[in-house]
Image (tube, grey):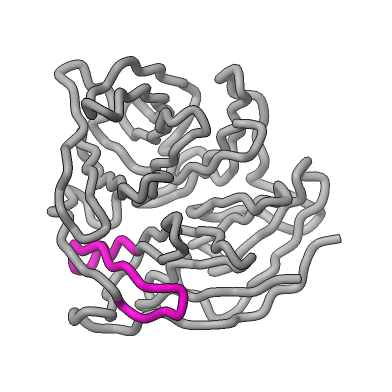
Amino acid sequence: MLPTMFREKVVGEFGTATGKLIWPTSVTTAPDGDLVVKDSGTGNIQIFNSEGLPKERFPYGFEPIKGLGDVTCMKSGVILVTSGTRIIQLFSKDGELIHELKSPKVTWPYSYGITVLQSNKIAVSDWSNGGKINIIGVDWRMNAILKTQAIEGFHRPVRIAVNKNEEILVTEGQLFGRFQGCCIKVINSERNLTQTIGPRYGKRFTFENPSGICVDHHGNVFVSDAGQNCIVMFNPDSSLSAVIVSEGLQGPSGLSMLDHGALAVADCYNHCVKIYKYK
């Protein structure tokens, strides 16, 4: 049985000052429960506490294409930022730039989504050559890239999530023009592309521009569709699906699960992050 959803809180509002947002596109949860938001409108990372109050704000630089990129957080609290370039930035929570992760052999020149795997490797989506997912092994003591593995078969992959079985779930949207995609693709733990969900799912629904994706501790999968301004939920084996939020969103983008069992949504064109509780 899929849950019912209700809005609990709105974090941020339109503006350029601390605590305000212009174009929030990505959101993640820090180990201490803070909310970390990438605001492509101002080029800043903003951190809010669990009550939605601003704690920190710092710049991450630039994006060659506005809105291209993502943010995620490691168990150590280090923040990882992609911006559509071949560099992955590492920040402390107080905004110090710790390192820029790159390599002369780098193969992700148009980085987009990023997530940390259980093995402490990272997965990065990339738009070059049609699209691929890069699995990157890192020596985190030296902040050095050890090895990369490219998984082909994608068309403009957007954001990435990983479940407890170490399966990688990837959204393929329609940002900047209509391309193949409109689906979720699943990579198994052996790093093979094994499943595609969509464009049509269930009996009545079709993805238009799936963007954000995350997984709760039960294995349920949440997907934001920026084209239809809604959030869809699938049960762990994707046999059941339902639109669980269909009103109040404009360009929903990144998603993140919070520690207390709530869902955070970067509501891009409403200039805020909305938090939903579900049963």
The mark tally for this picture is: 0
User: Which residue: 18% across, 22% down?
Assistant: 103
Figure check: 66 above or below 265: above
Going by the picture, which residue comes out furthest to the right? 1
Residue 78 position, x and y percent, is 31, 47
| Left/right of residue 188 with respect to residue 59 in the rendered view | right
Name the residue rendered at 50%, 62% in the picture: 227
Q: Position of residue 199 (x, y in %)?
A: 63, 45
Q: Position of residue 64 (x, y in %)?
A: 16, 48
Q: Nearer the viewer, residue 244 or 56?
A: 56
Which part of the image, by quadrant, shows the C terminus?
Answer: bottom right
From what the image shows, is residue 197 above or below residue 227? above
Residue range of the region highlighted in magenta in the rendering:
37-54
Is 31 placed left or right of 189 in the picture? Answer: left
Query: What residue is shown at x 35% (from left), y 50% (from top)?
Result: 77
Dividing the picture into quadrants, the one containing residue 246 is bottom right
The location of residue 253, given as percent across then percent down, is: 45, 61
Indicate whether residue 229 is drawn in magenta: no
Comparing 163 with 177, the one in front is 163
Quadrant location of residue 231? bottom right
Residue 261 placement: quadrant = bottom right
The residue lying toward the viewer, choosing from 51 and 141, is 141
Q: Quadrant of the N terminus?
A: bottom right
Q: Is residue 131 left or right of residue 220?
A: left
Q: Nearer the viewer, residue 13 or 157?
A: 13
Q: Is residue 62 left or right of residue 178?
A: left
Residue 42 falls within the magenta-colored stretch: yes
The residue shown at (29%, 50%) is 68
